[in-house]
Every structure is written in structure tokens, then in C-alpha cells.
Image: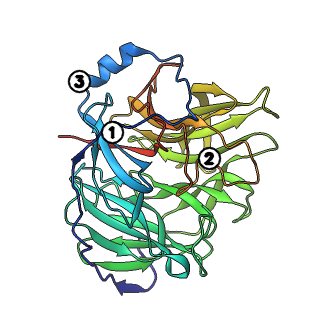
């Protein structure tokens, strides 16, 4: 599958993490807070016995760090604790032993985003690729696929990508995707059978802003959901069975009737023309509360996501974007099989985003 020129991956052990598993201290809630009304507290009781944890990113004390907590929101711990590096976008390996993520390092013209991997307890941190974005795991946990950053200075533009690369963690070798036209795509998710990726495409590959599937070892791509004026879908994530995806959605033409949701759909990538069916809104919120960053639990029972007030000024970067502060945002869980059944795992509103489930054996 990994066609193209292979290069040796120079794996570098980074500076030892200052504080691994540092217990969370008391934090003042942000003034720009969501009231978090409408929760189903019985769901929290279910989650107390659930054998998974949740990773996420949070901006506290002037820095982005990666955190981990139990499925019901208890026992929050800082995994990174660095002061001069911003760690974001955590993705746990399928077996729950490791996490890959991006880190913004350096200042001014020397600032760059890179891809790292470390143990789930924050130890043994290693560089996967400099100037890389949007890492995701193969289902066997042996390979990390990532997008290369576009040439040029550092940017928070979420679609500043050009080219996909696979890194074999055992050999340290990199191999470019056979499709050299992969650019301006974000939030890739790799199917369990390793045949397809789903992603958000931003005006490329014959699509506008859309959810797109593309072959892992070929050049075919298929538009699954196209956005229209006032409505969009973004950030798809494969369910563990590879037959469903979850994603963020917005509908309505203006603030008065704008509804944000986490939606699921069946996906058939083996059909002559891959397509979605049985679309269903699982949880919704009215303007200005936005729902984003959906991620399936390992058994497909729950979806973890982020929730918070949308940036009102359209001239400013939206709060869902990596490295953009999101005051008022929190991590929530919804039951994928029921409607409007959710509970908040964080309540301080300290830019809590990009959640991901961790399998606990």
C-alpha cells in the first residue's frame, strides 16, 4: 500500500516531559461559558463503569497540553506539562498503548508544527515527522499516516497541507501516498480494512468544502457530503466497524435558525459508487453553541465531542481550528444509539477540544 519513495524516518527522542500525569488543580471557569443545560446525568453513571478513557487538548496557563480522564470525567491528568511547546490533536493507538499528536514549536519565523508519538502515560516521546499535520493510525497500530504541511511559514490554516505520507513505526521508514494530488485536506480517518480514508476537503480534488473518501493505495476519490450555503459537514471519523462515520454538521441560514449537530451515517465504500445512507442527528444545539470534533468509542456505543460558543466575528479564526483558543468549550459524550442523550465531562470551558477515546484493557 505504501507506494512512492521511501525515506529513513529519523526518530528523535524529545526532551523528557516536565510533568507526566500531573494531577489537575482547581481552575476558574471561563467567563465565556456555555450553560451546559439539557444533560442526561444517568449517562454519567453508565460511564463510571466504562473501560475507556478520553484524551483531549486544553489551553491553560498560556499553553496547550494534552490531558487524559476517565470516561465519566473523573481523574483528570496532564500528560505533557510543557511550557514552551503546544501539544494538540491527540489520537490514541487502537490498542490504547500510545498516542500520536501534533506539537507547535519555536517562535516567529522558526515556528513549525510537527507530528510526535509517545506512550499513553506521556513517556518515551519521539518525533515522527517535522512539518506534519493531521496524523491518524492504521487499524493494526503499526503505521501513522500524516499530511505534510504546505511549504512556507507557519500558519493555523487547517487546510495548509500538501501530500500524504505513511510512517512505519517499526522500521522508521516513510513512504509517500501514490496520489500526489492530495492537498488542502484535513482530519483524515483510516478505515479498519486500510482501504480508504475519509477527510474534509477544502476546495480540491474536484470538490468544494466537502466530506470526501479517497483510496489508501490508489488515486480514486469520492465526494460523500457536499456543503451548501448556510449548511456544512466536517471532520468525519470512522466507526470501529468501518460501516459508519460520525461528523459535525450545521444547518440553517442564519443565527436565528442555525442548528449544530453531531450526525452519524452508514457508509458503503465497497459499492460501485461509495455513498452514505441512514443519516441521523444524534445530538444538537442551537446558535451559538457549536458541536464539533466527534470521535467513536472503541465499541461504537458512544461518541465523544466538543461543545462551545462559536466565534461571533467571522473575520477571526473559528474556535474549532487547531491552535485557536476556544473559551467556553468543553468535552461531552453522547450515546450513539439514542437521541439528545449527553453529558459534559469538563465544565471549566478552558478551550477543551479534540477529544479521542483510549481503549483500556
Determine crowd level at label 2: few under 14, some 14-19, many 20+ residues with C-alpha closer than 10 A.
many
Q: Can residue 142 be seen here? A: no
Q: Residue at x 33, y 34 (%)?
A: 299
Residue at mark 1 to residue at mark 3: CA–CA distance: 15 Å
Give me the disc on residue 29: none
Q: Residue at x 65, y 40 (%)?
A: 310
Q: Can residue 302 be seen here? A: yes
Residue 262, percent from left and from top? 57, 33
Residue 233 left/right relative to 89: right
- Label 2: element kind: strand
Q: Quadrant of residue 257?
A: top right
Residue at mark 2 to residue at mark 1: CA–CA distance: 21 Å
Determine crowd level at label 1: few under 14, some 14-19, many 20+ residues with C-alpha closer than 10 A.
many
Give me the disc on residue 234: 2
Quadrant location, the C terminus:
top left
Quadrant location, the N terminus:
bottom left
Residue 65, percent from left and from top? 37, 54
Between 2 and 228, the one lying in front of the other is 228
Between 123 and 334, the one lying in front of the other is 123
Residue at mark 2 to residue at mark 3: CA–CA distance: 31 Å
Instruction: Please name the residue that numbered disc 3 is placed on.
Output: 49
Q: Nearer the viewer, mark 2 or mark 1?
A: 2
Q: Residue furthest left?
A: 361
Instruction: Please name the residue that numbered disc 1 is placed on.
Output: 298
Q: Please say if 6 is above or below 144.
A: below
Mark 2 or 1 closer to N-term?
2
Q: Quadrant of residue 332?
A: top left
Q: Please say if 213 is above or below 11.
A: above
- Determine whether label 1 and label 3 are within 8 Å by CB: no
Amino acid at each position: 500500500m505504501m507506494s512512492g519513495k521511501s525515506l529513513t524516518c529519523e526518530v528523535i527522542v524529545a526532551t523528557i516531559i516536565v510533568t507526566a500525569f500531573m494531577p489537575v488543580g482547581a481552575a476558574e471557569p471561563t467567563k465565556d461559558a456555555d450553560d451546559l443545560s439539557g444533560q442526561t446525568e444517568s449517562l454519567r453513571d453508565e460511564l463510571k463503569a466504562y473501560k475507556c478513557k478520553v484524551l483531549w487538548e486544553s489551553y491553560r496557563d498560556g499553553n496547550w497540553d494534552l490531558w487524559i480522564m476517565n470516561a465519566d470525567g473523573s481523574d483528570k491528568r496532564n500528560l505533557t506539562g510543557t511550557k514552551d511547546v503546544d501539544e494538540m490533536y491527540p489520537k490514541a493507538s487502537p490498542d490504547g498503548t500510545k498516542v500520536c499528536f501534533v506539537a507547535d514549536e519555536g517562535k516567529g519565523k522558526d515556528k513549525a508544527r510537527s507530528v510526535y508519538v509517545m506512550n499513553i502515560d506521556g513517556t518515551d516521546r519521539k518525533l515522527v515527522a517535522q512539518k506534519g499535520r493531521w496524523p491518524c493510525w492504521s487499524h493494526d497500530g503499526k503505521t501513522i499516516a500524516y499530511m505534510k504541511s504546505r511549504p512556507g511559514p507557519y500558519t493555523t490554516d487547517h487546510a495548509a497541507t500538501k501530500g500524504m505520507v505513511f510512517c512505519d513505526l517499526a522500521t522508521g521508514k516513510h513512504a509517500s501516498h501514490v496520489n500526489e494530488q492530495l492537498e488542502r485536506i484535513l482530519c483524515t480517518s483510516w478505515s479498519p480494512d486500510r482501504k480508504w480514508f475519509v477527510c474534509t476537503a477544502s476546495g480540491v480534488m474536484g470538490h468544494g468544502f466537502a466530506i470526501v473518501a479517497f483510496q489508501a493505495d490508489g488515486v480514486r476519490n469520492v465526494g460523500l457530503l457536499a456543503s451548501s450555503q448556510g449548511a456544512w459537514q466536517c471532520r468525519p471519523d470512522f466507526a470501529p466497524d468501518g460501516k459508519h462515520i460520525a461528523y459535525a454538521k450545521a444547518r440553517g441560514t442564519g443565527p436565528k435558525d442555525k442548528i449544530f449537530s453531531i450526525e452519524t451515517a452508514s457508509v458503503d465504500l465497497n459499492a460501485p459508487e461509495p455513498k452514505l445512507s441512514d443519516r441521523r442527528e444524534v445530538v444538537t444545539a442551537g446558535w451559538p453553541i457549536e458541536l464539533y470534533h466527534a470521535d467513536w468509542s472503541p465499541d461504537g456505543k458512544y461518541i465523544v465531542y466538543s461543545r462551545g460558543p462559536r466565534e461571533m466575528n467571522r473575520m477571526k479564526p473559528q474556535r474549532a481550528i487547531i491552535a485557536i483558543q476556544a473559551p467556553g468549550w468543553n468535552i461531552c459524550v453522547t450515546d450513539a444509539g439514542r437521541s439528545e442523550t449527553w453529558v459534559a465531562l469538563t465544565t471549566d470551558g478552558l478551550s477543551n477540544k479534540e477529544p479521542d477515546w483510549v481503549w483500556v484493557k
